Image (cartoon, coloured by chain):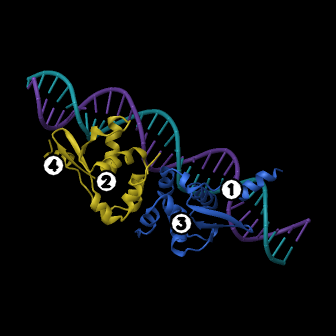
Chain colours: A yellow, B blue, C purple, D cyan
Amino acid sequence: MGTAEQERRRAPAHPEVGDVPLQQVLEALADPVRRVILRELYDSGEDRACGTFDIAVSKSTATHHFNVLREAGLIHQRYVGTSRMNTLRHKEVDAAFPGLLDAVLGHVEA
Amino acid sequence: MGTAEQERRRAPAHPEVGDVPLQQVLEALADPVRRVILRELYDSGEDRACGTFDIAVSKSTATHHFNVLREAGLIHQRYVGTSRMNTLRHKEVDAAFPGLLDAVLGHVEA
DNA sequence: ATCGAAGTATGATCATGATCGAACTTCGAT
DNA sequence: ATCGAAGTTCGATCATGATCATACTTCGAT
């Protein structure tokens, strides 16, 4: 099998946040499930495995949301064993979109 | 015919910005046509009639976008003759969602 | 009173994206 | 070597929303 293919799956591309269009970031932020994920990362500041988030969707849907967040430059993902750890790319997002994370994630939703 | 109905059309309800869910605001912001509208209001600070915006959509689509923006609490609309003047609700939005407008509209899009 | 300009309402189309289940892969532990 | 846990992939469904054309209303000007 293609070792390159395996490698790509285990270490998927993370864009430069500065290269991500605002449109894509806003679309990523405009979903309540994804904001729950971001908020948990934002509030705790810790790495978190995909399975540990308080979201009421199936595993395949969760995978979809994590992909959207990664491709929007908002999170970093890396494997640890069979778990996938997620980190908020806080500094980089702040640099590319000043004030946006704080405005969105600092807001207390009903 | 119902004068009440006519009145409702000419002076449609504007929500309190503080009552609008973040979800709704983000959905309103996550459309490129609507951001063009907001940006023109943001940059000029002037009232503008619906027809004067640099958006490449039909009149009915434009009406739709203005409705979305108004219902999200982002703009104020009032009739002047047959024109409908639009204002950014800058202060109120800033109060309810600190930093959000500046983060989104201050960003220079490609 | 009529006409045009500015929007609105309605109904249709069409694309996108959120969602799921089922089958699969990969790793760590037994 | 096998099993379960953690995700992924694939295909399908389904809801929403952006879009338009058409017909309509309303106002101001002639």
Q: Earlier in the sequence, mark 3 or mark 1?
A: 1
Are labels 3 and 2 assigned to the same chain? no
Determine which residue is flagged by label 3.
B91
Secondary structure, mark 2, is helix
Chain containing mark 2: A
Are labels 3 and 4 assigned to the same chain? no
Are labels 2 and 1 assigned to the same chain? no
Q: Nearer the viewer, residue B75 or B15?
A: B15
What's the residue type where badge 1 is placed?
A: Pro
Q: Which mark is residue B12?
A: 1
In the picture, measured across the screen, residue A54 lies left or right of residue B89, that is left
Report which quarter residue A20 is drawn in: bottom left
Q: Which mark is residue A71?
A: 2
Are labels 4 and 2 assigned to the same chain? yes
Question: Callout 4: 10 Å neighbours few (<14), some, many (20+)?
Answer: few
Do residues under tags 4 and 2 come within 8 Å of each other at their CB atoms?
A: no
Q: Earlier in the sequence, mark 4 or mark 2?
A: 4
Q: Nearer the viewer, mark 4 or mark 2?
A: 2
